[in-house]
Image (cartoon, rainbow, N blue to C red):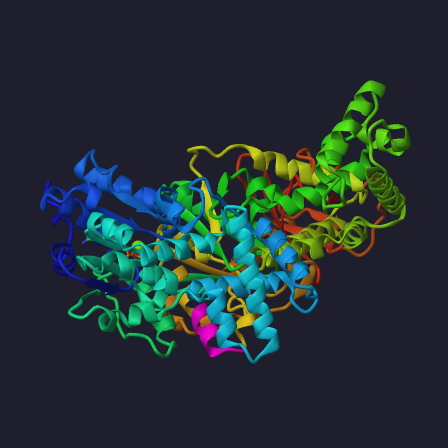
Amino acid sequence: MNFLDGLNDKQREAVLATEGPLLILAGAGSGKTRVLTHRIAHLIKEKGVSPYNILALTFTNKAANEMKERISNLIGDGIDAVWAGTFHSICVRILRRDIERLGYGSNFVIFDTTDQKTLIKDCIKELDLSEKLYEPAAMMSFIGSQKDNLIQPDTYINQNYRDFRERQKGEVYSLYQKKLKQNNALDFDDLIGKTIELFRKHGDRLEHYQERFKYILVDEYQDTNRAQYELINLLSKKYKNICVVGDDDQSIYKFRGADIRNILDFEKDYLNARVIKLEQNYRSTKTILNAANQVIENNQGRKSKRLWTANDEGCLIKTYCAENEYDEANFIVDKIKEISKEEDKKLSDFAILYRTNAQSRVIEESFVKSNIPYKIVGGHKFYDRKEIKDIIAYLRLIQNPVDDYAFKRIVNVPKRGIGKTSIDRLEQYSLKKGESLYNAMLDCDEIPGLTQRAKDSLSSFSSLIRKFMAMKEIFSVEDLIENIIDSIGYIEEIRQEDSIQAESRVENIREFLSVAVNFEQTSEEKTLEAFLANISLLSDIDKTDDGDRDTVTLMTFHSAKGLEFPVVFMTGMEESLFPTSRAYFSEDDMEEERRLCYVGITRAEENLYMTRATSRMLYGKTGNNSMSRFLKEIPQELMEDLSDNKMKSTFSTWSKASNSESPKYFTGYTVENTRKSIGAVDLDIHVGVKVKHKDWGIGTVVAIKDDGNDKQLSIAFEGQGIKKLMLSFAPIEVIS
Ligand SMILES: Nc1ncnc2c1ncn2[C@@H]1O[C@H](COP(=O)(O)OP(=O)(O)OP(=O)(O)O)[C@@H](O)[C@H]1O
Ligand SMILES: [Mg+2]
């Protein structure tokens, strides 16, 4: 097989330019990743390079595996010796062999963010500083960004000697590093930093790897930070056979230290570097590509390039303005059903993208209700998230104190000094007495072997739970949850853990409050029991293992980098959501949002949908956002607004239905026994039937869609517009 087949002239040139530094700077979908894989195949098969001499750096482990798979498809076996992986995974491999040179044991552990936080707190305490002034989360990101830029503690202290506060921050950093070493531990950023240190201090190790990695390839180069840049620079210094591919328009990790200069300055850093631009896009239709080009042109300070494609014009980009987030989710589900039926598409052909993780919850709910399997890339399913499970465990224990599983999950969450030994003793006692853990806790004074401290902690935990039990009787579910979160200090605990993930975890908790608010609004029975039943229904179905099943993919715009799908839904296209309001104060941040939007648009091959909602509840609050500026940057003639069409077509069905069935407009009625059943499939529903909904009042069924399992009703409520409800969930009564 010839590895130059299936490549255009420019791509071929890039594959053949194996010696010397090479930058492939090209827009989305132009075959950068494809060039990398063909290049590796060409090196091995045509140039006789040993796989052992090749290093391929990618952005995620998944991308690395995919790359290996693609090369295997090209050349068969024998690529196992190629080192392909993320910067972090490659550095771990190097350090396991040689870190002893830096005074660490080769069995070093990698500290996660929780461990890091504990360590930082210790340092702050030891230095007699206040956690209020030197907030642990802030200290953690401070240390992280020093490491991204390869600034050592001593250097930082010396540079800031006159500034008391900055000097103290430097001292925390310095002590933190000492303590890590005492624990034979590295944090994530150290993996790269220590590898560089090893190479700088021990020339022979550097030479060894320079000699080994004669050919280095880096994908998604635009998102490397200074430390990663330095590492590549060191390794490639001898042979200079370095090929980096990237797109400055897709740099989206500035908030993690990615430095776009690395790509813009490549030609300065590597003299005689060849630059190849790929300009043909193979992924998307003309319409989609045109939209992407138009959006990104609003950014200043980019290397100007314009992608073209020989692909078809394709269909227009569809926009849909939903009434709220549920309507948005239903629209997506409807479209997926419709398209997969009509166009013979697999579920894996669809991707749904959103700006923040919390947006996935409502969409997940719609998928669960419609029985459409889905998977979430780079995140947990909403109800599988630790913080959500914790709060649910509280609710379960309050509802049902004999739930030992829930008890064990939260007895020490947030940490309240009830250690494993105490829990073991409690458990032994409860077994002996044949009681639940909760009941055993109530007479903890009797339990042998418990320290006074443990007893105190247990009894304050039990009064906390008793307080919640009392609240349950008078509070709404929403208020109860809010109270629990406040009383246990859960959000503060999370905030102290780390900076990047903490915010999204807090957002998830707020989003869980939205679940409760929605429950209050839509459910007949408003008890905690009903609430728990409701969510266990959702989370149970959630748990089924996806395996290799054909599923729709849900993910954030960030996680979608490098991927492609025939049909893409970009959701939440609203001001303050996308672009996020956090970007309003800085032109740079706004440009990064725009690049993220460009990444989103260019994931789509054939069909692109952009949805938004006029009213959206997120984090427990309802807001009305206007249309995202990015939508306005796309020329009108490339788009088709389905919200209008939908209203038009539904209204025409409605008037037809009104004529043929001549439903009488409602003037007055008695409620008695009119409610035949809630959410029952035996409800006698047909177009024209009048129904009553407790919040929306009287409405007429104007359309029914049957998907085999359930029926989706479109109901026109007087003064409320048309709402879509699933028959099995709709809290409605038939009144005519
Ligand atoms: N010469 C070609 N002939 C046919 N298909 C091609 C060619 N080059 C690339 N493709 C296809 O186009 C799509 C995009 O390629 P690839 O993923 O390599 O682009 P990319 O530049 O890495 O995109 P991104 O910037 O999104 O990472 C892939 O499906 C790839 O197989
Ligand atoms: Mg790529």
Residue 567 falls within the magenta-colored stretch: no
Q: Position of residue 735 (x, y in %)?
A: 76, 45
Q: Position of residue 356 (x, y in %)?
A: 54, 58
Quadrant for the C terminus in the image: top right
Q: Name the main secondary structure of what is drawn in magenta.
A: helix
Q: Is residue 231 left or right of residue 587?
A: left
Q: Is residue 640 left or right of residue 394?
A: left
Image: 146 above or below 60: below
Image: 45 above or below 119: above
Q: Position of residue 174 (x, y in %)?
A: 54, 62
Image: 448 above or below 39: above
Residue shown at 46%/47% (left/top)?
377
Considering depth in this image, is 341 or 525 the residue closer to the camera? 525
Considering depth in this image, is 128 or 410 the residue closer to the camera? 128
Considering depth in this image, is 95 or 19 the residue closer to the camera? 95
Counting labels gives 0
Image: 628 above or below 545: below
Residue shown at 66%/59% (left/top)?
126
Residue shown at 82%/19% (left/top)?
432
Q: Is residue 402 left or right of residue 445?
A: left
Res. 613 visible in picture: no
Q: Give the extent of the magenta segment.
A: 585-593
Quadrant for the N terminus in the image: top left
Location of ligand 2 given as a quarter of the image: bottom left
Q: Is residue 441 left or right of residue 144?
A: right
Res. 628 visible in picture: yes
Considering depth in this image, is 574 or 402 the residue closer to the camera? 402
Q: Position of residue 139 (x, y in %)?
A: 59, 64
